[in-house]
Amino acid sequence: MRDRVRKPGRRLRLAAALAVVALAAGVGAGALWLGRDQSADFFRTESAEIPYMAAYDAVLAKWPVAYEEITVPTRLGPTHVIVSGPADAPPLVLLHAAMATATVWRPNVEALSEHFRVYAVDIVGQGGRTVASRKVKSRQNYADWLNDLLDGLGIARASIVGNSYGGFIALNHAALAPERVDRMVLISPVGLVSWMPVLRSMIYQGLKGALLRVFDSDAPGPPDILAVISREAGFNAEDEDWLALGRQLMDGSKRINMIMPGVLSDAEFRAIRAPTLLLIAEHEFLYEPDSTLRTAMARMPGLTGEIVPGAHHLAAMAQPDAVNARIVAFLQADDRKREE
């Protein structure tokens, strides 16, 4: 019986292909954000929409205060907003982290709506009940979209709280439309410093895991992004229904419609006029908290900043009482000065 010489099999060819992809990802991870899919539809299939919206509604059903839902026409598509608080209170716009939807602010809306007319927005292109009509292609697109939204809500000028990608949109608006921003609170935002090393590392680890699973079916599966985000802090028990919504983003049935959040220039930071509070989570995964805080305070004159103890990337969800109190105190600072 002759020995058979085995030719390179499917697994070896796949492993080689993954190695090439891993190399390319290490060089240009940002390409994954831009993508080649030009569709603006959030759902890849009709069947994906039903369970997602059911999960969204399950979170909204536990909204702790009275609210109304408003849909505002904008040039990027009809934008869904959850509105709470007194109609005559100062306007406060909440911009969530990437794909997190307006429902992520549930732990915060009760405290904030005691003092403000709160507008929790489903950011265009990122799910929720907002329906994007076209692709987002530039920072100016976001500025125009937010201006349309404020105009549709009848708001000339508002304070903005933004977490992560929402912080990037807030920063962008303060730079491109400063006349529309009163005060700004940034919670672990992107756009302050480069976070590409973290993105490259995440992509590399994911591809390395895929490569290992080619040869070993018992190798660990891909990392849970929610576990990566929460790190040592973990999520609270009352966040479980929001986590159920978040996990639906990982099944490949949704499209990302956003631009790579680049770092603003020094000139743009210096030109921002809105008083700004920067809150960075103690267990932040995008960057080192203390050094980032020092860098940001050096780049933005007059910036106020601090670390949120015990918090992960979604700090307003992880430590709502502390973050709510800090937001209210900062946004009402001028009112207290006038009273004194």
Image: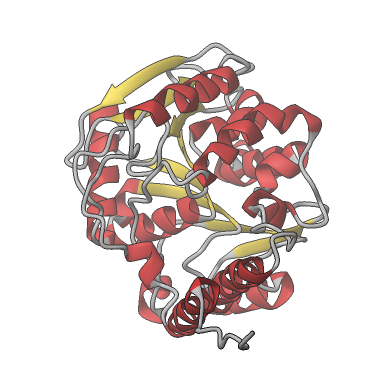
Most distant residue in the left direction: 75
Most distant residue in the front direction: 1
| Closer-to-camera residue (144/201) | 201
Which quadrant of the rendered structure holds the N terminus? bottom right
How many numbered circles are shown? 0
Q: Is residue 116 left or right of residue 174?
A: right
Image coords of residue 196 (percent x, y)? 51, 76
Which quadrant of the rendered structure holds the C terminus? top right
Seen at 58% across and 85% down, the residue is 4
User: How did the renderer colour the structure?
Assistant: secondary structure
Image coords of residue 243 (percent x, y)? 65, 36
Image coords of residue 309 (percent x, y)? 82, 55
| Closer-to-camera residue (226/98) | 226
Seen at 77% across and 57% down, the residue is 231
Q: Is residue 217 left or right of residue 137?
A: right
Q: Is residue 315 above or below residue 266?
A: above
Seen at 52% across and 48% down, the residue is 97
Q: Is residue 173 above or below residue 322?
A: below
Seen at 45% across and 78% down, the residue is 17
Q: Is residue 84 left or right of residue 219?
A: left
Q: Quadrant of residue 40?
A: top left
Can residue 141 be seen in this snapshot?
yes
Can residue 271 be seen in this snapshot?
no
